[in-house]
Image: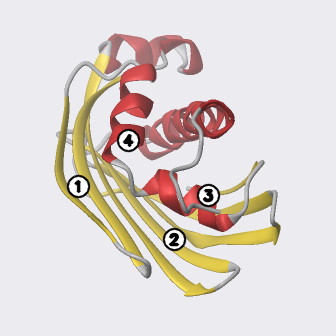
């Protein structure tokens, strides 16, 4: 199962880079998305790279699932995120996302880039491949997980845009 995602942000890369590397932003984002527990096991951020590894209990968007899958899904799902951002030029960042539904045998891997279109606009483009990691996974589970990931990424984007509009830049930030 594959899908593409494009999201726009109302800020340049400098402002977005600063937010992506802040523990405060990460914690606020996942709490606003209904995370019951959040454990950030790695957060490293400098001028060239940002890497985040975290585990969380994510709400399952039951309304996005077919009726038969709701019975199997439960209301919360343990998820591990591993995100790497690498600044390759003044106006481009390469991105890798690895999102795993722990105990479900499915993974979504996204690769793409974030481009500054202007000092007040950036665009993220990602290509995701979603696959089963175990032969015991029910047919169709990768497609269901892809649907959940797409829903979560849309909510993540909405939070990020609101956050960027509400939180003032740090001193010295573009």
Q: In terms of sequence position, does the residue under pointer 4 or pointer 3 come before the other? A: 3
Q: Is residue 26 above or below residue 124?
A: above
Foreground of the two, 135 or 58: 58
Residue 106 placement (x, y as % from top left) = 33, 49
Asked if residue 64 can be seen in this view, the reply is yes
Label 1 to label 4, Cα distance in Å? 30 Å
Q: Are marks 1 and 2 in contact (CB under 8 Å)?
A: no
Indicate the secondary structure of the residue bearing disc 3: helix
How crowded pointer 2 is (Cα within 10 Å; few <14, some 14-19, many 20+) is rated as many
Pair 3/2: label in front:
3
Q: In terms of sequence position, does the residue under pointer 4 or pointer 2 come before the other? A: 4
Residue found at the very far bottom of the displayed protein: 89
Q: Is residue 22 above or below residue 152?
A: below
Q: Which residue is mark 2?
A: 95
Q: Which residue is mark 3?
A: 15
Pair 1/2: label in front:
2
Label 3 to label 2, Cα distance in Å? 16 Å
Pair 4/2: label in front:
4
Label 4 to label 2, Cα distance in Å? 16 Å
Residue shown at 44% from the left, 21% from the top: 32
Q: Which residue is mark 1?
A: 134
Residue 55 placement (x, y as % from top left) = 21, 42
Q: Which residue is mark 4?
A: 26
Foreground of the two, 174 or 149: 174
């Amino acid at each position: 199962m594959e899908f593409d995602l494009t999201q726009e942000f109302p800020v340049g890369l400098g402002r977005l880079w600063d937010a992506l590397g802040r523990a405060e932003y990460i914690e606020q984002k996942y709490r606003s998305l209904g995370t019951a527990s959040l454990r950030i096991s790695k957060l490293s951020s400098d001028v060239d790279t940002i890497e985040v590894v975290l585990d969380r209990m994510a709400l399952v968007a039951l309304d996005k699932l077919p009726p038969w899958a709701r019975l199997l899904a439960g209301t919360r799902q343990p998820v591990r995120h591993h995100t790497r951002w690498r600044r390759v030029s003044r106006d481009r960042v390469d991105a890798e996302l690895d999102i795993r539904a722990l105990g479900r045998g499915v993974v979504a891997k996204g690769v793409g880039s974030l481009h500054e279109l202007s000092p007040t606009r950036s665009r993220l483009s990602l290509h995701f491949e979603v696959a089963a990691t175990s032969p015991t996974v029910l047919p169709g589970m990768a497609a269901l997980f892809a649907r959940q990931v797409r829903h979560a990424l849309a909510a993540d984007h909405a939070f990020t845009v609101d956050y960027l509009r509400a939180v003032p830049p740090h001193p010295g930030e573009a």
